[in-house]
Image (cartoon, rainbow, N blue to C red):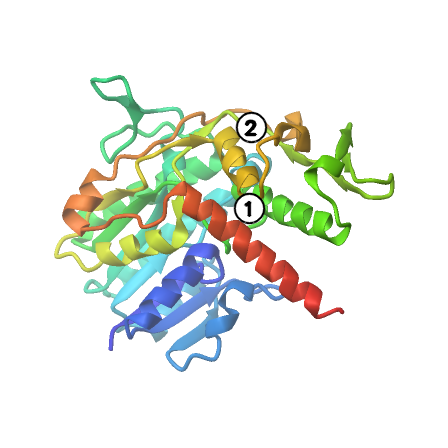
């Protein structure tokens, strides 16, 4: 039976990866930071799984990491998904992503060396945000990013991810460590954090659709004024969706697909770095069109407010990955396209809303 440790188990990717590894027969140890509130909502369904163990640890504390690895010295695979992963937050707290995302990765790598765990295989979650405003151009004029594109980070989060990425390369070469980086482009799903734009949009649409159903409203019943949408009477109202730059482009995939690529990297004979993406890019404007279209309207612009508060000081306007290497060497292909992803997120949101509503009636 193979064993694995997942740092960042309570996040979207950690929960999906735990599901995948347990399905493959692994014993999994998940590491979560201590919190005064429950942070296990995404892994509730596996907490009683006999092959799953949850331990507390702080990735910013090298002694904490050292002791966790010492207690699991025979582990086969280590996945570092722990990060302060929200770009906007990193701009407001610029030192935080270095402590968690940058230094945290080094703490893991150095503990592996200090414990002489040189047979372990390591995965580091790198990010497309590292490319920032950098891209290459095909002969036909299309912009893209692959493993050879230079990094030009536009946020403290992206800078910290670059530091972790280069640290893995250094330890790989210096100690012959089987350590690979997955440069993952945006990956979403029902388990995505609520402060990320795709989840913010689909959550609002779920609340909006539920509000319409509760008040027996159709689209022709609605009118809007300023920051609110109204029904047939004034007291039937809901605040509009507030967004920033809706003309930036992202390569969006499904997180459940992407964790399979993580696992595949550690099944290779040699370590390497891989871009993981769909190869397609869409603007947030197009995401809105698809999301509102899924609930039966294309007249979405009257339901949103563009708010300068949500603009970044340094924007990343265009991300579109080239996954040729992952397809060729890993045999990996994404299963979900954007339409499938949008419908999955909205349907799951509606089901959760109805389930929670049923508890109180």
Res 187 seen here: no
Image location of residue 224, percent across then percent down: 76, 31
Q: Residue furthest left?
A: 269
Q: Nearer the viewer, residue 119 or 239?
A: 239
Image location of residue 198, percent across then percent down: 52, 42
Quarter of the figure with residue 167: top left
Q: Nearer the viewer, residue 63 or 305?
A: 305
- Above/below status of 190 relative to 239: below
Res 193 seen here: yes
- Above/below status of 286 relative to 60: above
**Residue linked to disc 2:** 312
**Residue linked to disc 1:** 199
Which quarter of the rendering shows the N terminus? bottom left
Q: Nearer the viewer, residue 73 or 246?
A: 246
* Front of the two marks 2 and 1: 1
Which quarter of the rendering shows the C terminus? bottom right
Instruction: Answer with mark 2 or mark 1, whichever residue precedes in sequence.
Output: 1
Q: Residue furthest bottom?
A: 50
Image position of 353 (left or right of 88): right
Residue found at x 20% / y 62%: 118
Q: Nearer the viewer, residue 203 or 120?
A: 203
Image location of residue 221, percent across then percent down: 75, 38
Image location of residue 247, percent across then percent down: 50, 25
Residue found at x 44% / y 66%: 31
Structural crowding at the residue carrying mark 1, measured as other residues with C-alpha within 10 Å and reported as few (<14), some (14–19) or many (≥20): many
Residue found at x 37% / y 37%: 128
Q: SS at mark 2?
A: loop
- Above/below status of 278 relative to 154: below
Q: SS at mark 1?
A: helix
Image position of 14 (left or right of 225): left
């Amino acid at each position: 039976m193979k064993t694995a440790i997942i740092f960042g188990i309570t996040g979207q990717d950690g929960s999906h990866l735990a599901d995948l590894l347990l399905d493959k027969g692994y014993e999994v140890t998940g590491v979560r930071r201590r919190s005064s509130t429950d942070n296990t909502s995404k892994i509730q369904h596996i907490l009683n799984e006999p092959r799953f163990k949850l331990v507390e640890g702080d990735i910013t504390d090298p002694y904490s990491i050292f002791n966790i690895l010492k207690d699991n010295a025979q582990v086969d695979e280590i996945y570092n998904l722990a990060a302060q992963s929200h770009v906007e937050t990193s701009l407001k707290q610029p030192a935080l992503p270095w402590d968690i995302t940058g230094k945290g990765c080094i703490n893991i790598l150095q503990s592996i060396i200090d414990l002489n765990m040189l047979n372990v295989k390591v995965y580091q979650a790198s990010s497309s945000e590292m490319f920032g405003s950098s891209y290459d151009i095909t002969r036909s004029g299309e912009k893209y990013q692959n493993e050879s594109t230079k990094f030009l980070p536009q946020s403290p989060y992206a800078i910290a991810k670059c530091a972790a990425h280069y640290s893995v390369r250094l330890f790989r070469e210096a100690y012959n460590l089987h350590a690979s980086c997955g440069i993952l482009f945006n990956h979403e799903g029902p388990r995505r954090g609520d402060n990320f734009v795709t989840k913010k949009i689909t959550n609002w649409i779920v609340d909006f659709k539920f509000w319409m159903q509760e008040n027996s409203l159709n689209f022709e019943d609605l009118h809007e004024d300023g920051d609110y949408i109204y029904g047939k009477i004034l007291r039937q109202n809901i605040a509009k969706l507030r967004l920033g730059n809706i003309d930036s482009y992202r390569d969006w995939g499904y997180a459940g697909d992407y964790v399979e690529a993580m696992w595949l990297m550690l099944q290779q004979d040699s370590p390497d770095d891989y871009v993981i993406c769909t190869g397609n890019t869409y603007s947030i404007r197009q995401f809105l069109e698809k999301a509102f279209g899924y609930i039966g309207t294309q007249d979405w612009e009257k339901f949103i407010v563009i708010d300068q508060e949500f603009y970044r000081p340094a924007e990343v306007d265009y991300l579109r990955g080239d996954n040729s290497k992952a397809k060729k060497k890993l045999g990996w292909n994404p299963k979900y396209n954007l339409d499938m992803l949008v419908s999955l997120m909205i349907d799951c949101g509606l089901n959760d809303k109805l389930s929670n509503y049923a508890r109180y009636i």
